[in-house]
Amino acid sequence: MTITIYHNPHCGTSRNTLAMIRQSGEEPEIVEYLKNPPSRDKLISLIAAMGITPRALVREKGTPYAALDLANPKWSDDDLIDFMMAYPILINRPIVVSPKGVKLCRPSETVLGLLALADIGQFVKEDGEVVSPKRPGGRAE
């Protein structure tokens, strides 16, 4: 199975998602999207495959979101895509592509639904949170 992760190694959620993919036995193609941003067409196809709007993919925290006034409803979907192309840090992450679908994996355990082997056993996130795929929602009690 081929898996691709649009990854930011400085993001804990992205690192946790990558680690879960690896714990499932897969070695994904890693696209560090800040160094190698997707083309406009690829970004549009990822958004369509996730079934979300461009606004739902725009990241606020740690980005120029506020300075660019991106909360303003005047911005069209095309405008928001233009901003993400100009400032790739605005693309929320991690995005995972697998034969089972495409998702923005926030929280990181969202990736379990995209894996061939979703029962990866117990996983401990960097912050100490325990994830168990046998529990509803993927979180341990």
Image (cartoon, helix red, strand yellow):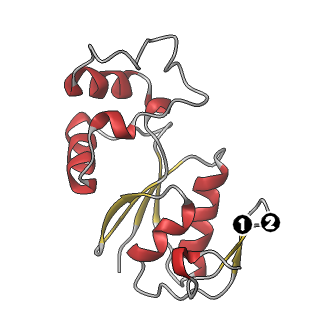
Q: Residue at x 37, y 59 (%)?
A: 103
Q: What residue type is labelled 2?
A: Gly
Local crowd size for mark 2, using a 10 Å CA cut-off: few (<14), some (14–19), many (≥20):
few
Q: Where is residue 138 in the image (x, y as percent from the top left)?
A: 56, 76
- The residue lying at 58 percent from left, 84 percent from top is 135
In this picture, is 77 found above or below 97?
above
- Compare residues 11 and 3 and report the one nearer the observer: 11
- 141 left or right, relative to 7: right
Residue 109 falls left or right of residue 72 = right
Q: Which of the 4 image quadrants contains residue 4?
A: bottom left
- Quadrant holding the N terminus: bottom left
Q: Which numbered dot is residue 68?
A: none
User: In the drawing, what numbered circle is on residue 125?
Assistant: 1
* Number of the label disc, if any, that sits on residue 128: 2
CA gap, disc 1 to disc 2? 5 Å
Residue 78 horizontal/vertical position (percent): 20, 25
Residue 3 sits in quarter: bottom left
Q: Is residue 76 above or below residue 135?
A: above
